[in-house]
């Protein structure tokens, strides 16, 4: 099972995705951590973004071949990035979008976060480029005190394993 957790920077997707991976006993793959491993100096160019998303997809294909569950944590702001997962994994991919209100996102992004280098300006730029996901998926709103509720909703949405 491939679980794609996506949303804008500051939405709380990484916090949620890392905990969901524990609950589902899945491997966890974070785009920010992968980018840091892949590029000593990061410029967030289109080429760099493509390389990171290609690497995420390759790792997802390997996990699927091993029949290993994987939680992928990335923005996935473009439909084409999500579509390749639908095309490749069909009924074995599940999408969970994490959202939060603007005030909370701004507050979260004003502090240093473990791996993300995005600030509120990056959030606003990606929001302009955001392409809505039209396929059926779970949308969860993140607050600073509802991780248990988010996990419960995700576990109801995902198939039992």
Image (cartoon, rainbow, N blue to C red):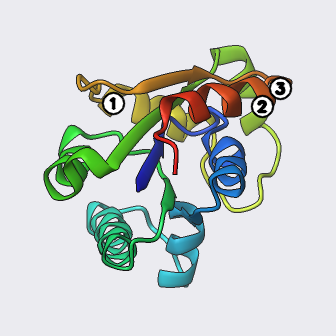
Q: Is residue 105 left or right of residue 112?
A: left
Secondary structure category for the residue under label 1: loop
Q: Nearer the viewer, mark 2 or mark 3?
A: 2
The part of the image, by quadrant, that contains residue 107 is top right
Residue shown at 46% from the left, 40% from the top: 159
Query: Where is 9 relative to 127, above or below?
Result: below
Q: CA distance from mark 2 to mark 1?
A: 25 Å
Residue corresponding to mark 3: 144
Category of crowding for the residue at label 2, using alpha-carbon neighbours closer than 10 angstroms: few (below 14), some (14–19), many (at least 20): some
Secondary structure category for the residue under label 2: helix
Quadrant location of the N terminus? bottom left
For marks 2 and 1 on the same chain, the one whose residue lies earlier in the sequence: 1
Q: Is residue 34 left or right of residue 109?
A: left
Residue corresponding to mark 2: 147
The part of the image, by quadrant, that contains residue 33 is bottom right
Q: Is residue 39 visible?
A: no
Q: CA distance from mark 3 to mark 1?
A: 24 Å
Q: Is residue 30 visible?
A: yes
For marks 3 and 1 on the same chain, the one whose residue lies earlier in the sequence: 1
Q: Is residue 10 left or right of residue 113?
A: left
Q: Position of residue 73 (x, y in %)?
A: 52, 53
Residue corresponding to mark 1: 130
Residue at the far front in the pictured view: 161
Category of crowding for the residue at label 1, using alpha-carbon neighbours closer than 10 angstroms: few (below 14), some (14–19), many (at least 20): some
Category of crowding for the residue at label 3, using alpha-carbon neighbours closer than 10 angstroms: few (below 14), some (14–19), many (at least 20): few
Comparing 99 with 117, the one in front is 99
């Amino acid at each position: 099972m491939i679980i794609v957790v996506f949303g804008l920077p500051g939405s709380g997707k990484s916090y949620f995705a890392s905990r969901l991976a524990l609950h589902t006993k899945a491997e966890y793959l974070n785009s920010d951590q992968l980018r840091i491993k892949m590029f000593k100096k990061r410029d967030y160019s289109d080429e760099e973004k493509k390389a990171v998303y290609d690497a995420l997809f390759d790792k997802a294909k390997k996990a699927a071949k091993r029949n290993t569950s994987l939680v992928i944590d990335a923005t996935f702001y473009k439909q084409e990035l999500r579509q390749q997962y639908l095309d490749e994994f069909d009924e074995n991919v599940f999408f969970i979008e994490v959202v939060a209100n603007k005030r909370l996102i701004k507050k979260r992004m004003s502090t240093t976060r473990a791996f993300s280098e995005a600030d509120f300006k990056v959030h606003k730029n990606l929001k302009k480029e955001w392409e809505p996901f039209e396929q059926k998926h779970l949308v969860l709103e993140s607050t600073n005190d509802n991780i248990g509720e988010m996990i419960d909703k995700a576990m109801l949405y995902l198939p039992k394993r």
